[in-house]
Image: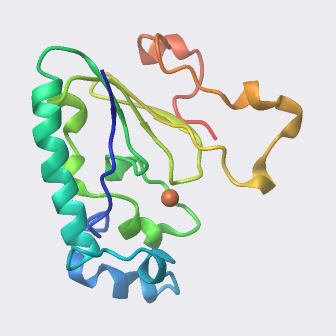
């Protein structure tokens, strides 16, 4: 069962000492501010956080029903877990990268693979035996055009069954 999701961010991808409502100010201390603050209108919701939480509630109900009988592939623009957000150059961009409410969706909804983008940093990770694929193309300045598009396509299924069979680092750009 392939589940295309549209779960947003709610500013909860931040250190525990920073309250979600302070996350934008915390990022701005480093000069970081997402264009989403200007360009992503939450209407008819009161805020992007409210929009995110409405999407989480909607998807949770749908996934609980749909995943009861079949393994799933969860596909979301944003990564579902904060520990997969590794923004070494701009760590305070994390508030715009997802919501902690999806932290356990990979086990809760029987995911075989979780697919995301958004970070522009290609990676494969394994958490609780579930494969997480960040499948963006990266930024144009990082592209290796000689690889062609085939060099950028990621096999989702069947894919490697376990981390050991990847034969290389589990995290790669
Ligand atoms: Fe994005």
Depth check, front residue: 22 or 150 = 150
Query: How is this picture coloured?
Result: rainbow
Counting labels gives: 0
Does residue 34 appear in the picture of this structure?
A: no
Examine the rendered structure and indicate whether residue 27 appears above or below residue 169: below
Examine the rendered structure and indicate whether residue 163 appears above or below residue 48: above
The structure residue drawn at horizontal position 42% and vertical position 81%, both measured from the top left corner, is 37
- Residue 163: where, in percent of width, then height? 44, 18
Specify whether 14 is left or right of 49.
right
- Residue 91: where, in percent of width, then height? 48, 67
Depth check, front residue: 65 or 91 = 65
Look at the image and tell me in which quarter the C terminus lies: top right
Among the 4 quarters of the image, the one containing residue 123: top right
Specify whether 111 is left or right of 157.
left
Examine the rendered structure and indicate whether residue 135 appears above or below residue 2: below
The structure residue drawn at horizontal position 17% and vertical position 24%, both measured from the top left corner, is 67
- Residue 141: where, in percent of width, then height? 80, 56
Examine the rendered structure and indicate whether residue 156 appears above or below residue 49: above
Look at the image and tell me in which quarter the N terminus lies: top left
Does residue 60 appear in the picture of this structure?
A: yes
Among the 4 quarters of the image, the one containing residue 28: bottom left
Depth check, front residue: 165 or 44 = 44
Q: Residue at the far right: name it.
A: 146
The structure residue drawn at horizontal position 77% and vertical position 54%, both measured from the top left corner, is 140
């Amino acid at each position: 069962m392939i589940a295309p999701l549209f779960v947003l961010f709610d500013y909860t991808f931040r250190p525990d000492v920073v309250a979600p409502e302070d996350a934008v100010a915390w990022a701005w201390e480093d000069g970081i501010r997402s264009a989403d603050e200007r360009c992503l209108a939450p209407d008819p919701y009161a805020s992007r956080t409210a929009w995110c939480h409405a999407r989480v509630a909607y998807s949770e109900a749908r996934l609980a029903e749909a995943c009861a009988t079949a393994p799933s592939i969860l596909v979301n623009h944003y990564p579902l877990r904060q520990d997969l957000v590794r923004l070494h150059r701009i760590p305070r961009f994390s508030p715009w990268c997802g919501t902690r409410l999806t932290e356990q969706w990979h086990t809760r909804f029987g995911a075989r693979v979780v697919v995301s983008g958004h970070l522009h940093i290609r990676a494969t990770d394994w958490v609780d035996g579930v494969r997480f694929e960040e499948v963006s193309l990266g930024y144009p300045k990082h592209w290796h055009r000689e690889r062609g598009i085939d060099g950028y396509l990621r096999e989702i299924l069947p894919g490697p069954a376990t981390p050991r069979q990847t034969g290389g680092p589990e995290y790669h750009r």
